[in-house]
Amino acid sequence: MAQVKLNRGELLNPPWTANPQVTGGFLYETPIHLLDMCQYLFGEVETVKCESRQSISESEFDDFAILLTFASGTIGTFVTCAHAGWSYPFQRLEAYGKYSTIAVEDMEKVIYAPGLKQAAEVQDFKQVPFEEKWGYVEEDRLFIEAIINGSKPPVTAEDGYLLSRLLDGIYESAKTGKPLDFRK
């Protein structure tokens, strides 16, 4: 099982972030990155069901509650709000195993509870440079190596397509209220 939440402080500032003609919609503006990470961690999404609403936006959905099933068998919930204020943590991912939990908060803190009646381990990354802890250094290195060596890049066009297909499917489920099965 997994649970992910992302709150964005204010979809209306800067103004272009609320314009789906520019961003493709709120999910493409910020949540896309965590949805991508979920597919990296748990495998391709097989089914999706979304409930959403327009809370402050006049032109698009800005609150989402999404139920996802992944190829790995993981079932996850993903909740995102475009106007929640800047309450910490903005992002939180929790994954559950046999009597264990791992949680990541804003790439700042990792909490690992290895089992029953065991102390949780906490790692704090607040002092690590932003570019490093958010993966930009490694991402750039892998991309440059792929160009120089002619090898497969770490992220492919197919990865981008599958992510776009997922977001389009979430919007479709939000509009119709029906689940979507990507295995068909």
Image (spheres, helix red, strand yellow):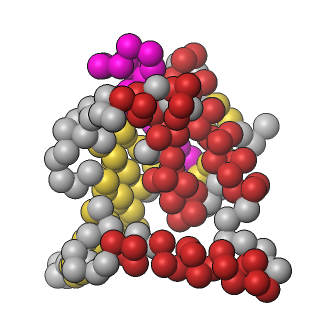
Give yes or no for residue 68 being in the magenta stretch.
Answer: yes
Tell me the residue at 51%/47% (across/down): 32
Which of these two is toward me, 44 or 35?
35
Q: Could you tell me which residue is drawn at 22 percent across and 75 percent down?
A: 126
**Residue 22 coordinates in the image, percent (x, y):** 53, 31
Magenta-tinted stretch: 49-69
Image coordinates for residue 84, horizontal then vertical, percent: 23, 36
In the image, 114: left or right of 170? left
Residue 131 higher or lower than 57, as above or below? below
- Residue at (79% x, 86% y) in the render: 149
Instruction: Give how far across and how far down residue 169 sits, in percent.
Output: 63, 32
Could you tell whether 18 is left or right of 83 in the image?
right
Specify the quadrant of the image occupied by residue 129.
Answer: bottom left
1 relative to 118, above or below: above
- Specify the quadrant of the image occupied by residue 120: bottom left
Image height check: is 91 above or below 177? below
Outermost residue toward the right in this view:
150
